[in-house]
Amino acid sequence: MRKIETIEELKEWVQEQKSAGLSIGLVPTMGFLHEGHLTLVETAKQENDAVLMSIFVNPAQFGPNEDFERYPRNMERDMQLAETAGTDVIFAPSADEMYPRESAITISAGRLADQLCGKSRPGHFDGVLKVVTKLFHLAQADRAYFGQKDAQQLAIIESWVADFNFPLEIRRVATVREPDGLAKSSRNVYLSEQERGEAPHLKKALEIGKQAVLDGKNPVPLMEQHLTDNTSGKIDYIQLLSYPDLTENVVSDAILALAVQFEKARLIDNLIFTIKGN
C-alpha cells in the first residue's frame, strides 16, 4: 500500500490508473478507522480496480467550540487497518496542502442542512461539501463510498453530485454496528464505561420509534421517554423526515434520526425505512 501526502503526487497516481483503464473507488475518511470504514473499503474493492482512501481531519467542518483538536488520530494504526482491508493508496494531506489559501468562494449546503445535525452545527455541511468537492476532483473516482450512519451527510452529498453533474456514483453502505447495536463511530472512545453501557439504547429507541411510525403514531414521545429512562445523555434532537430530501412531508421513504449528547461525545444514529405498504 502506498501513502501519498501531496496533491501533485496524487494527480500522478490518478493519471497512471486512468491511462491503464482502471476504475477508482474513493473512500473519504477522517481516520481513526473502525469496522464501518473497513466495510466501505471492502465494498469499494469488490466494485473497482483500485481503492483510494483519504485520511484528513477536515478543519472546515468543525465549529469553533467543537472537537477538532482532540479528534482521535492514529495514522500508523489506520495504515495497518486500511492495508489489511485492501486499500491500495492512502491520501493523507496536511491542512495547508488541502487549503493553501483562504478561498474567496464559499459553498452552501442550503435547505438540506437546516434539519437534524445541521440545526446545531451551522456551517458544518458547507465544510463537508468543500472537502468532498476537492477530493472528487482530485481522485477522479468512478465511485465514492459513504456510510448510512451519517445519513444527512449522505443525502447532501447525493444531492450535490446529482444537481451539479459530478461524474461519479455515490454508493451507500449500511451502518456497521457493535454486537449490542451501537453504531460504530470514532467518537465512541470518548464514552465513559457507564455511557458505553447506555449507548445501545439509541438503537433501541429508534426501533421503538419505527414501530410507532408504522402503527400510525407519533414516535417522538415514546423515544424521548426511552432515552430519558435509560441514558444519562441529553437529547439534542429526534426527527422523522422524508429521505433523502429531508422534508416533513413523509409519504414513503423515511428517516428516523436522533442525536444524544453525552459528557464528552455526541452520538448520532438513524433508521431509514419505507412507510408505504407497511
Image (tube, grey):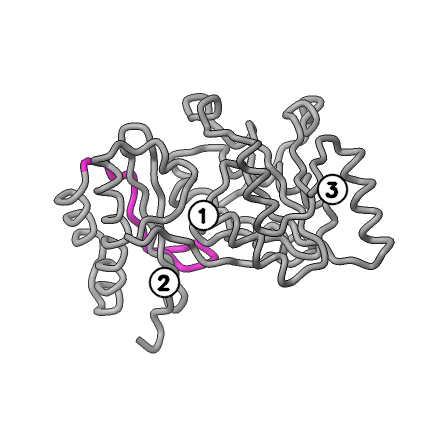
Marks 2 and 1, how far apart at CA: 20 Å
Is residue 167 positioned above or below 114 on the image? below
| Magenta span | 232-249
Q: Which class describes the residues within 10 Å of circle 1: few (<14), some (14-19), or many (20+)?
A: some
Q: Tag 2 or tag 3, which sits nearer the N-term?
A: 3
Question: Where is mark 2, residue-wise?
Answer: 250
Whichever of callouts 1 and 3 sits on the residue coming sooner in the sequence is: 3
Decide: few, some or many residues near mark 2? Use Cα within 10 Å; few <14, some 14-19, many ≥20.
some
Q: Residue at x 70, y 22 (%)?
A: 101
Q: In the image, which is nearer the foreground, mark 3 or mark 2?
A: 3
Query: In the image, residue 194 lies at what x, y percent?
Result: 20, 35
Q: For the view shown, which residue lies furthest in the right direction?
A: 19
Amino acid type of disc 3? Leu
Residue 43 against residue 84 in the figure, above or below = below
- Local SS, label 1: helix
Amino acid of disc 2: Val
Pointer 3 residue: 138
Q: Residue 148 colored magenta?
A: no
Please say if the residues under marks 3 and 2 sit with CB atoms less than 8 Å apart.
Answer: no
The image position of residue 212, as x and y in percent, is 21, 63
Q: Nearer the viewer, mark 2 or mark 1?
A: 1
Q: Along the polypeptide, which appears first: circle 2 or circle 1?
A: 1
- The residues bearing labels 1 and 3 have C-alpha atoms spaced at a distance of 23 Å
- Up/down of 113 relative to 243, above or below: above
Residue 236 shown in magenta: yes
- With respect to residue 170, does 4 lie above or below? above
Disc 3 secondary structure class:
helix
Q: Residue 218, image x and y in percent? A: 21, 59
Of residue 107 and residue 128, the one placed in the foreground of this image is 128
Residue bearing the label numbered 1 = 150
* Residue at (67, 30) in percent of width and height: 93
